[in-house]
Amino acid sequence: MQQPAKKRASIRGLMELTSRFIETIRAEFPTFRIVPKRGHWPSRAIDLALKAVTLGGQRHYLTHYHTVIGNTLFVPPPWDGMSDLDRVILLRHERVHLRQRRRYGGLLMTALYLLPIFPLGLAYGRARIEWEAYEETLRATAELLGVEAARSPRLRAHIVARFTGPEYGWMWPFERTVQAWYDRTLATLGSPSASPTIE
Ligand SMILES: [Zn+2]
């Protein structure tokens, strides 16, 4: 979306920020919708395929991962228990994927994301696509929860493991490179005193 005036985050109603942010996404992607993964058979098929290619390294696709396919976000059961702010942070990550798909087109996006799966561990296209989205995760975390939250070592370990570990097929197992991307992104975030804001 075009940059609107920034407003202070306030929690007036339950999931109010999430509802507003979904409307913001729909202004850009009118067919955007959120669908539970559970009971969605293509998600079950993807889950089985991922278990097979990662030799069981990715066993949580259905239960822990949010996935954008087309303009639909498929959500696992933990979505229901997420806080309003955490949902907005996640939606900001996923909006990057919606924009990437518009930028590259569905075919190229799928190719960049999926084809370099062999050999596992050298999926540079997927790593760059995800890195762009995780940069937005860090920016959103800094804006909504504060810069200290974005600098949390726990968040860092979690995100770095997504690149170097099996969940995304060891997409970029060079930890030093990922740590350097991380440092560069953190360096662009505001000062610790910056107050949380929302678009
Ligand atoms: Zn992603």
Image: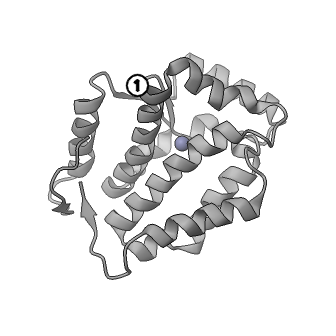
- Across and down, in percent, residue 9 comes to 21, 63
Q: Which image quadrant is residue 179 in?
A: bottom right
**Residue 151, above or below 109:** below
Closer-to-camera residue (65/127): 127
- Location of mark 1 (residue): 71
Q: Position of residue 191 (x, y in %)?
A: 37, 79
Question: Left or right: where does residue 173 sit relative to residue 154?
Answer: right
112 left or right, relative to 34: right
Residue ranking furthest to the bottom: 193
- Quick one: 163 or 14, which is closer to the camera? 163
Q: Quadrant of ligand 1?
A: top right
Q: What residue appears at the point 56 percent right and 26 percent down from the top-left corner? A: 109
Residue drawn where x is 59% and y is 34% of the image: 62
Whether residue 112 is visible:
yes
Q: Position of residue 39 (x, y in %)?
A: 51, 22
- Residue in view at x 75 percent, y 61 percent: 175
- Residue shown at 78% from the left, 52% from the top: 173
* Image-based side of 75 in relation to 111, left or right: left
Nearest the eye: 59 or 71: 71
Classify mark 1 as within 8 Å of ligand 1 or not, answering yes or no: no
Q: Is residue 170 above or below residue 106?
A: below
